[in-house]
Each structure stands twice: as C-alpha cells, then as structure tokens.
Amino acid sequence: MIKKVLLATAASALIATAASAADLPRRAAPPPVFTPVPVFTWTGFYAGLESAYTFTDNQRITTTGLTAVTAGNVQAGRRPGLVTTSQDGIANIGGTAGYNYQFTPGSGIVVGVANSIDWTDITKNRFILGAPLAGGVLPNPSQYRQSLDWLGTLTGRVGYAFDRFLVYGTGGLAYGNVFHDVNFYNPAGTLQFAGRYDDFKIGYAYGGGIEFALPTDSFLNTFAVGRYLGIKYDAITIKAEYIHYDLGSQNVLVNAIPGVGTGAYLSRFKTEGNIVRAGFNYKFGGF
C-alpha cells in the first residue's frame, strides 16, 4: 500500500514539473548568418589580348631641292613638292598589360597605367609620275614608301566606374619602328636620287575607351581560355578603345646616285594615324 502511494506521489510530481517547464519561455532561435555580397573593384593588375584596326590620316610628305640642285627643280615639276598618303583597313593582333586603382569599390574614380603593343604592318607606297617638263620632255617619276611595322603606347588613364562598367580617357607616349624610303628616277626610268630612314621613334598618343567586367556567373566565362590553362584570375573584362598617335616628322636626305645625278633633295615625312582596339583582359587582385 505504501509503495503504491509513493509511486502515485512521484508521478504527480513529474507531471507538475513537466507542466511548469511548458509554461517557461522558450530560448530564442539563433539569428540567420548574413553573408555580405562582395563589391566589385577595378583595383588590380590585368593582362590580355586585343585586335587592332589601324587607319592613317592624310600624311604630308614635302620635298625641297637643296642648293646643289638646279633652282626650280621642285616647282617646275621635276619632283613633287607635296605628296599625301593614307591607308586604312589594317587589322592585326597585339597585347596589353597594366594596373588600375579604384578609390571606392562599386562606383567611383579609377586611375591606372597601361602598356599596349600592336603589330600594325602599315605600308604606304606612292608613285608620282609628275607633270611633263617644258619642251615636251617626259616627267621624272618619284616613289615614296612609308611603313610602321608595330606601334606601342605607354599611357595613363583616368575614368569613372559604374560598378562593372568603366569609361576612361587615356594619354601618354607612343613609340614604334618607322621606315621612310624615297626614290627619284629620270624620264628613262634610271634611279637618280635615293634616301632612306629606318629607326625607332617616340611620340605621343591620346584617346579613350570603355570596358566591362563580366559577372562571374556569365555564360561567357565558360569560353575563357584561362580556365583551361590553369590561370587564376578574378574577372574577365572586354574593352574597346580609340587612340590617336603622332610620331612626329622626319627629314630624309635624298642624295644623288654617283655617276647618275647631281645635288640632293630633302623629303620630310609625317607619321600619325589612328588605332581602334578591341579585346579582353584577365584581371588579378581585388575581387
């Protein structure tokens, strides 16, 4: 009998304890973990490939006769005093590398420096027959050749980023290998005068462009060559930019061929033009 009373008492106490525990406030659930979304920044090094479309302005070639040449040779039609050359439609490949710094991630001012080198292979060839001389004498043919094998630009740039979209202006040095060649013939087709210049020149360049960083989930990233070469990069960007370059003027002394001509001329070449670049970059550093 006593045993039954004790068991009943214990059961009642257990039920009362459970009821009291049910009335107590429950512990609050832990707050969800907040993972901030990384903000894109243009800060970091980059390198890539580009295709370059080059076209030249009407570049002036002026020729003057020196004192040893009979007065009036240029003006009388023996040699053209002014020739202009131009060429376009040259598309080639090149590469670029540089560094950007963005002051505020997301949207903000971006400054940087870039070095690009493009194989241009621009060649211009002008053959001028000239006007007939007095007395029905045949004219003196003249030939001018000018080429720019490759062009490099070392420029700074300043722009503004709208998150993954960047607009910028650029300016700095232009450099490349310049070739000038002049050949003057007599009416019979015999070479009388010749001059040549082939050397490295430095000038200036300026322009602007746009660049867009592809989102990491963009399907275009699946075509990135770097993925298959094991290149670790933060983003891929695509760009388009316009550059005007000017490598200055160059005098070419056109001397007489011994035993054929006498005296000398001076031809002055101007090398300038435009280049449009489109390409992609691998961005390293930052997000």
Image (cartoon, helix red, strand yellow):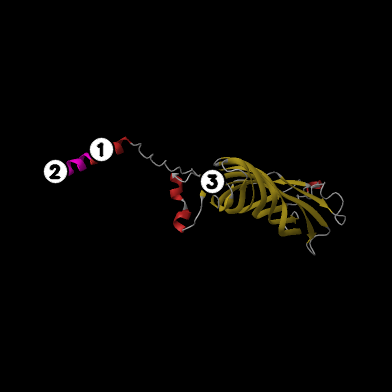
Q: CA distance from mark 1 to mark 2?
A: 18 Å
Q: Tell us which disc is closer to us: 1 or 2.
A: 2
Tag shown at residue 4: 2
- Whether residue 245 appears in magenta in the rendering, the answer is no
Q: Which residue is mark 3?
A: 238
CB contact under 8 Å: marks 1 and 2 = no
Above or below, 16 against 47 in this view is: above
The answer to which of 107 and 199 lies nearer the viewer is: 107
Residue 245 at x, y = what percent? 69, 48
| Label whose residue precedes the other's in the sequence (1 or 2) | 2
Residue 221 at x, y = what percent? 46, 48
| Label whose residue precedes the other's in the sequence (2 or 3) | 2
- Whether residue 9 appears in magenta in the rendering, the answer is yes
The amino acid beneath tag 1 is Ala
Q: Tell us which disc is closer to us: 2 or 3.
A: 2
Packing grade of label 3 (10 A; few <14, some 14-19, many >=20) is some
Packing grade of label 1 (10 A; few <14, some 14-19, many >=20) is few
Q: Which residue is mark 1?
A: 16
The answer to which of 97 and 192 lies nearer the viewer is: 97
Residue at far bottom of view: 258
- Residue range in magenta is 1-12
Principal SS element in the magenta part?
A: helix
| Label whose residue precedes the other's in the sequence (3 or 1) | 1
Q: CA distance from mark 3 to mark 1?
A: 73 Å
Q: Could you say whether the residue bearing mark 1 is in a helix, strand or loop?
A: helix
The amino acid beneath tag 2 is Lys
Residue 272 at x, y = what percent? 70, 48
Q: Residue at x 72, y 56 (%)?
A: 201
Residue at far top of view: 23
The amino acid beneath tag 3 is Ile
